Every structure is written in structure tokens, then in C-alpha cells.
Image (spheres, helix red, strand yellow):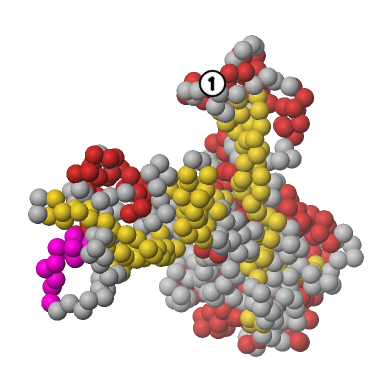
Amino acid sequence: MKRILSVLLLCIVILTGCSSNADELLFKNFTETLSGGDYAALYQLLSEESKQRITEEEFVTKYKSIYSGIKATHFTFEMGEIDHKNDIIPFNLTMDTIAGTLKLKDFALPFVKENKELKILWSESLIFPTMKRGDKVRISTKTANRGSILDRNNEALATDGDLISVGIHPAVFEQENEAEKIAKISELLDISEETITKKLKANTNKEYFVPLVDLLPDAKALVILESLNLDGVIKQAKHGRIYKDSEAFGRLLGYIRPINEEELSKDTEGIYTAQSMIGKSGLEQVYETTLRGINGYEIYIEREGEKVDTLISKEPENGKDIHLSLDSNLQQIVYDSMKGQKGSSTAVDSTTGEVLALVSSPSYNSNWFTTYMTKSVQQQREAIGYEDEKNRFASLYSPGSTFKLITAATGLENGTLNPNEVKTINGSTWQPNRSWGNYNIHRINDQTSISLKEAIKYSDNIYFAMNALAMGSDALIQGANNFTIGSDLNIGYPIKESQISNSGSLTGDILLADTGYGQGEILVSTLNMALAYSSLANNGSIMSPHLVLSEDYQSTVLKDAIISEQNLSILQADFQAVVNDADGTGHLAKINGVQLAGKTGTAEIKSTQGQTGSENGWFVATDLGSSKLSVAMVVEDVQEGVGTLGVVKMVKEVFVNYLK
């Protein structure tokens, strides 16, 4: 161990220059070899009598074991007045240890003269003053608790607790029906018989407990296991991390796992040990320094099995809790509604900005990483190519037609869009002039006379492309920023920052026109879109979003009055028509008694026009009546499965189950 040396010699007799006294030189050599960890050199300072009592190997091993075990560093020595009558050098010693700074007084360094040299009469009291031959130095760990992760109702989503370790007592287990019992355990716990057999074979003592798996305390398998009454199968309590037992929370919470060598090497503060658990994903990783506890330690001397002297004791520092705005019930509802489809969904409270649900689908159960994974779970994860590891709620997507709210609001506020003006649009393709070459804007509806309401209800791409060109790139960029596009949304969890384009500008009419209806290079998170539509239910303003709530948290406005009162009523009516009117693209979301305003979107993912690419389906909706909820959901590859209308049904299911 590399040590930073600091040797302070304070003598009662004031010396001038470097002392040549033999006793002072002996003390100097003693302190330098001890603080430098050169125990072999220290051994050479011992008297012949001392060497008869302990071999060099025993001496070096003893010091190294004790001092490295307590992580002794930064030695400081204070020498007292030498007792020449009794040949003793008194001194005090201060050193840093794993339990803090240890200050020891009343050391006595006895010495004798051998062959014209002074030598140390060594005993265990030169390790610690109260230590005697046969004593042991012990370190006990006072385990600190990791902070909990709590939802808005103080329900624990992640907390320390007792797991149940199920294992085998081989001496009893192997007495009879071993193969039959292995088969039953394998079936019940959904682990392979080979796994059980390997663990038993690896055990060298038949009286040792052989752990198989860890289970949650309320696991059904424990009840069944108890009823089977299998000889040699035993249970033990084990301290561990317990998570909300659902896949809906996994990708957000993350999990803890044993620290690796690289992580340990970066621990300059010495907080972790090789046995530490550390956040590896999700909130557990993001808030590792907040959640982690710092263990306490007691260093003491043990004599004949009894503690006789506590040298130093440090109390543990428990980790701090994290409080989320998350509504656990809603998180589960949203996740269930997505039915394992690949995608993301975010729900916010329109009037506070609090994030109520943050879902990535598919996801995992965090308990899989702190208990065990069954064979079935492993096979399921392999079958989906470990898609549950992707963090989709932190990812960016093309918003498709859900962006049309932003184009419409910006045009209305700038005065470049007249909601009552009826545009005549013929055919399914359009370009402003021949300078676009073969590039055209496409639409799926066939109405000839289109005003703002029809354009929103039928999701007319050409109408919004025209209006984007009319307002210009600077206005659309500013309008997008008003609705959080390009803003750093610091919710307490890293979400990728959205963009209006790759360069941040809208150069060229084609890119400007495509952006106007939500294609082009614009990329957003579901958080961006949930916030954008929340403005319809919050008097035209967007609140600062929060997921992790501090003690002094207060709701604040992020974007104030981005929609004026006059234009707000227009947009509310038009986006309600998407849901309420029988021919609206989001009519499947209509719920009697609920004032939903929303918009569908289908974002085509392809490199050039004319190609066949994948499609992501969107639906964003906000409740204008209660203002409780604004939900944005995107599902990937809808062309192969549920389609955009399937996403509409999913979001409707969220509102039905949450508002009922």
C-alpha cells in the first residue's frame, strides 16, 4: 500500500541540527520503517531476545495484516522525553484508519544495547499500547442503509430489506431422494437441475449452507417450498435491495450490483470496498452518491474471544431518500396499456409539471438483478433481443403530426395563420414550385377545402407545410422553443435534449416545410410532447417539469402564456374535434364525460423520399376538464403491428383507468 508519510518528532530537549544520539536515531528508524510499511526492515531493528519470540515472517505478516486491514495511513509520531534510566522512549501516534483518525497515547519503546547498537525490545504493545501476546485486532462493519426511492405517496419503490436465501444443507439433503428433490426444486424455482448440481459439487464441506437463489419475502414459491417439506432445504434471511415488484418500474429505477474493479479504482474517497453494491442503471445509478450509505467501523482488541478495548469507532452514515413525483398507480396503468410494445410514454400534471409516469416498454423487473432470473425470464429476454435494456423514455423520436400543435400555435400567435381562411388543396401531393424537383409533400386525406380545424382533424400535411413556409424558419424555430423543443428539461433524470434540426437551423424550404408537419430532422422525447399539449389545459403556459422533488420544491412556470387566451380557445376546440368528431383521427379515444384534446401522429423513418421505411405511431392527449393529466405515447414499428390507431386505444385506456 502506498503511504503518504508525515513524521513529526517533538523532543523535550531542543536539538540543534540533525541529532546524532543513538536513541533518537533508533526512534527515527522505527518511525520511518513503520510508517513506510517496511516491516522487514523494522524487524531488523529488533533485539535478539525479541527475534527469539517471533520470526520475521510472523512479524511481517502480523503488521501487514493489522495495518492494511485497518487501512492505516498518514502516520504522525510525537516523541516524549527519553527515560535514560529505564531505556524507554515514550511516544504518541496518530494515524488515519478506515474508522477515522486514531490517536494513541502512552506508547513505550524499550531498547537495549547489543554489539554497540541500540535494538528494540519488541512486544505487541508496540502495535497498540493495550495489546498483549495472543490478542487479535478485529474490525467490525456497521452496515449503512441505502436510501430509499419513494413515489409521491411515499410508497417505497426501492428500499433495503430482508430477502430470503433458499439453499441446501448437503449433509442432510444427500441422505435420501437427492435426485427427486433436485427435480422438485428445479421445477418450483424455474432453475436448471444442472445449476443445483454444480453448486452442490463446488461445495467442500457438507455442513456448509449452499445458497441457491434469493427470493422476495412474499414470494409464492416460499409457501409452496414450505409445503413440500424437503429434508435439507433451508432458508436464511439476507439483507438486500427490494424493488417494486413490477416490470413497469425497472427501466426507471434501475438496480444495484457488486462493484467492479474499474469502479473501485475510481473511488478516491475510500467509501467502497470490494464487497460494496453500487447503482448500475436508472435512478440507482444517477443518484448513487445520494442513495449510497457510508459504512461505519469499529476497531477493537480481542482477547480470548472477548472484546477488551475499542480503539476507535465510527458510526455509519445512512444514504438519503429520493422522493419522486411519480404516481405508481399511473405508472403501472401506462405500462400495462402498452402491452409490451416497443415505445415510450410520459404523463405529466398539466398544472404543476410534475412527471406522473415515465415509461419505457418493454422493461425489466429490478428484482431480477438482486434476487435471480428464472429460466423462463432469461429465455423471454433472449427472445426479444434484450430490448428491455433500452431506455426509451430518455430517447428522441420524430414527432410526426403531433408537432402540428406547435406549428398551429406559432402561426396563430405570429398572425401568419388565419384559422378561418379556407385553403384549396387539390390532390394528395404538393410542392410550391418546380425548384423542388421531384420532391413533394404528401397527405393521406382528400379534402379540397381546408381550414385550420379540418387540417388538424384530418392531419393535413400539405396545409401545415404551407403555413410553415408562410411563417419562415426563424418564427418556427422560436415557436418550437416556446414549446420546450431544444430546451434543457432538467427533471432530475437525464433525458436527451430535443432538436429542431441537426444543425439547429431550418435551411432550405424543403426542410422548413417538412418540419411544419413534424417530419424533417426534428426529434423530441415523449416528455416534450406531454408538456406541449399540457399548455392546452393550463391557460397556454407550460410548467417546469419535475420527477425528483427536493425538500424546497415549488411548482414554477417554464414557458409563460405561449398561447394567448383568444388563440387558446381556438386550439382547444380544434384539437378536441380530433377526438370528439366521428371523422377525427383520434376519435377512438373519445370518453363520455371527459374533455380530451389530442393529436395522432405517424412518423416515417426513412432516409429518402420514395423509400419504404418503418413507422412510429403517436398519440398525445390532455384532459381539459380536470387538467390532471397530459399523456404522450409513441410506439415503434406500428406498421407491423398495432398501427397508430392502436396507440390511440392505449392512451384512451390510460385515461379511462386513471380518471375513473
Is residue 76 something that shows in the picture? yes
Q: Residue at the location (62% across, 41% down)?
A: 238
Residue found at the very far left of the displayed protein: 116
Q: Amino acid at mark 1?
A: Lys
Residue found at the very far front of the displayed protein: 85
Q: Camera-side residue: 248 or 92?
A: 92
- Residue 18: say if magenta: yes
Q: Residue at the location (54% across, 76% down)?
A: 487
Magenta stretch, residue numbers:
17-28
Q: Is residue 495 left or right of residue 345?
A: left
Residue 330 x, y percent position in the rendering: 75, 58
Q: Residue at the location (69% across, 46% down)?
A: 245
Residue 249 x, y percent position in the rendering: 66, 52
Using the image, determine if residue 293 lies above or below residue 257.
below
Badge 1 local density, few (<14 within 10 Å), some, or many (20+)? Answer: some
Quarter of the image containing the C terminus? bottom right
Residue at numbered disc 1: 206
Under circle 1, the secondary element is loop
Is residue 616 something that shows in the picture? no
Q: Is residue 621 left or right of residue 260?
A: right
Q: Is residue 511 left or right of residue 549?
A: left
Q: Camera-side residue: 436 or 224?
A: 224
- Residue 176: say if magenta: no
- Determine which quarter of the picture holds residue 12: bottom left
Residue found at the very far right of the displayed protein: 593
Using the image, determine if residue 642 lies above or below residue 396.
above
Q: Camera-side residue: 426 or 511?
A: 511
Q: Residue at the location (46% across, 75% down)?
A: 504
Using the image, determine if residue 491 lies above or below residue 121.
below
Residue 133 x, y percent position in the rendering: 38, 44
Residue 470 x, y percent position in the rendering: 57, 82
Using the image, determine if residue 390 lies above or below residue 597.
above
